[in-house]
Amino acid sequence: MNEPRPQVQLHIPWSTLLKLAVFGAMVALVIVALDVLLSIFVAVVLALGLDPVVGALVERGWKRGRAALVVFASLFAAVALIVLITVGPLWDQVQEFVAEVPEYWEEISNSDAFQTFISSGSQEDVKNALQDLASGLPEAASTLLGIAGGIFGSALSLVTLTFLALFMLIERHTITEWLFDLAPPDVQRRWKPVLEDSISAVSSSLIGNVAISLVAATVAGVSAWIFGLPFPIVLAVLTGFLDLIPQVGATIAAVVLVLVALTVSTPAAIAMVIIQVIYQQLENYVVYPIVYRRAVELSPFTTIVAVLVASSILGVLGAILAVPFAAIAKIVIREASRPRRERMEALGSTG
C-alpha cells in the first residue's frame, strides 16, 4: 500500500510580502521618474564638484549662500561668454551669406545651364515643384514649432537643474549632517571621511577636466588661426567641448580639425596632424597624470571602461560624468573592503 506523500507548506510572512511590495513600488517609481532622478543626479554631481570652491570662500568668512550664488554667477558668466564668442562669428557669416544671395541668384540665372533649363520647355516642372514646395510649408512649420518647443523644454530643464544644484550646494552640510545623525557613531566616524574624499575627487576631476579642455581649445584655436582655417573660434570651442569626454574626446576633436584643414590645403592638414599628435601625447602623459592620478587615482583602462559604460546609458553627459562616478565607486569599494584586507594582512603576518 502506497503511503501518502507528505505535503510541504510554504509560509510567507506578511512582512516579507510587504517588503516585496515596497521594493516593487520603488522600482516602478524609478522607471516612471527616471528623467527626474537623472536630473537630480546631475545636480548633485555639479554641486559636489563646486563644493570645495564654495568651502574655500566660506573659510575666508563668506556666508555659504552668498558664496554659492557668486560661484554660480561666475559659472554662468563664463558659459554666456563662450556662447557669445561662438555665436558671433557664425552670425557674421550668416549675414554675409544672406547679403550675397542676390548676387548668387544673378550668377545662377545668367548661367548657360539655367537658361538651357528654362528654354527646354520645363516651365511645367518648375510650376509643379513650386506647388509641392507650397504644400509642404504647413508640415515644415509644424516641424519648426516642434523644434522650438524642444528648445524651450531644454532651457526650462536647464533652469530647473541649475536651481537644484544651487540649493544642493547651499544645503550640502545640513543634508549630510542630517543623514549621518540617523547612523550610529561608529558608522559616522568611518564614512564621513569617505564622503569628504568623494567630494574632493568629484571636484578635482570636474575642475581638472575643464582646465584640460581650456588648454585643448586654446591649442586648437591658435593653430586653426595660424593655418587659416574657417571659424577658428568655433573650432576652438568645439574642441574644448569634445575634450570634456576623457580619453576619446580629444581624438574626435583632432579628426574634425584635420578634416577642416583639408578644405584649406594638404600642408595645413599635415601640420594639424603633427600638432594634434604632439599635444595629445603631452595631454595623456603629462597633463592627465598631474590632474587625475593624484586626485582620482584611476588607470587609463578604468577610465575608458567607465566612459564607455556611462556613455551607453546617458550619452555624452554620461561620458563627462564617468570619471567622477568611477572615482566615487573606487573610494567606496576601497573603504568597504578595508576590514577584510586588514584581516587578511593580519593572517598573513601571523602565518
Image: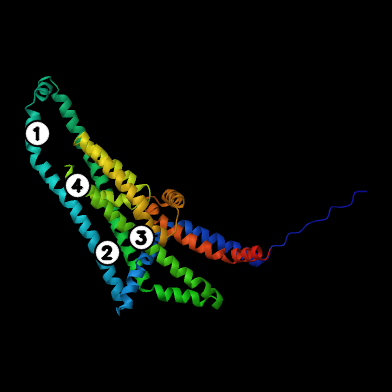
Q: Which of these two is toward me, 203 or 301?
A: 301
Question: Can you tell which mark lies on residue 232?
Answer: 4
Above or below 120: residue 272: below
Question: Can you tell which mark lies on residue 75?
Answer: 2
19 horizontally vs 133: left or right: right
**Label 1: element kind:** helix
Quarter assignment of residue 348: bottom right
Q: CA distance from mark 3 to mark 4?
A: 26 Å
What residue is drawn where x is 34% and y is 57%?
209
- First in sequence: mark 3 vs mark 1: 1
Q: Give yes or no for contact between labels 1 and 2 (Cβ–Cβ under 8 Å).
A: no
- First in sequence: mark 3 vs mark 4: 3
Q: CA distance from mark 4 to mark 1?
A: 29 Å
- First in sequence: mark 4 vs mark 1: 1
Residue labelled with disc 3: 206
Question: Can you tell which mark lies on residue 151?
Answer: none
**Label 4: element kind:** helix
Residue labelled with disc 1: 105
Amino acid type, residue under disc 3 in the picture: Leu
Q: Give yes or no for contact between labels 3 and 4 (Cβ–Cβ under 8 Å).
A: no
Amino acid type, residue under disc 2 in the picture: Leu
